[in-house]
Amino acid sequence: MELDAARPAAARLDIVVSGLASDAHTWNLVYLQLVLEEMGHRVTNLGACVPDGLLTSRCGQAEAPDLVVLSSVNGHGFQDARRVIGPLRARLAGTPVVVGGKLGVGGTGGHAEALLAAGFDAVFENADAIATFRGYVERLAAGVRS
């Protein structure tokens, strides 16, 4: 894919990508970073095994990001995500926060309703998650918050 150099600066989002505290995987974070950069956005990748306190403090520094993307592939993302969304919402009330990947040890699916109720703006855990995620980011960059 080519970098979207034609994207106007105003439509470039500042995005934080992060793993969750119990997840040591990095390939998913690098992949998301590359996808978002190819879409023309600026990405700060906090890496894997990010403690909850570090995640909330880094996301709340100076200027808040336009989007926070949490990813997990170890199957424990559901528990980690539910624990961290409250502190993130307290710091980033108006910032979209999304989560995706393998969120449960029983496979994919079934966690969206609970995570949306807990405060996430979107949950990406199905077979077409990347395509759906890309569409979500494009709508956000265009100023559509849904």
Image (tube, rainbow, N blue to C red):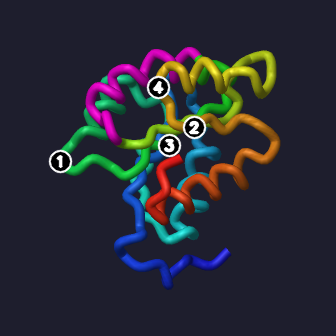
What's the residue at 41%, 61% (across, down)?
13
Q: Amino acid at mark 2?
A: Ala
Left or right of 98 on screen, residue 107: right
Q: Looking at the figure, which quarter contains the N terminus? A: bottom right
What's the residue at 56%, 26% (across, down)?
116
* In the image, farthest residue toward the bottom: 6
Magenta-span inclusion, residue 83: yes
Question: Which residue is label 1 attached to?
Answer: 62
C-alpha span from label 1 to label 2: 24 Å
Magenta-span inclusion, residue 37: no
Res. 122 mark: 2
Q: Do the residues bearing badges 3 and 2 touch, measured as CB atoms within 8 Å?
A: no
Q: Residue 39 in the image: x percent, y percent?
A: 56, 68
Question: Which residue is label 4 attached to?
Answer: 119
Magenta residues span 79-94
Q: Measured along the vertical axis of the image, is residue 37 above or below residue 96?
A: below
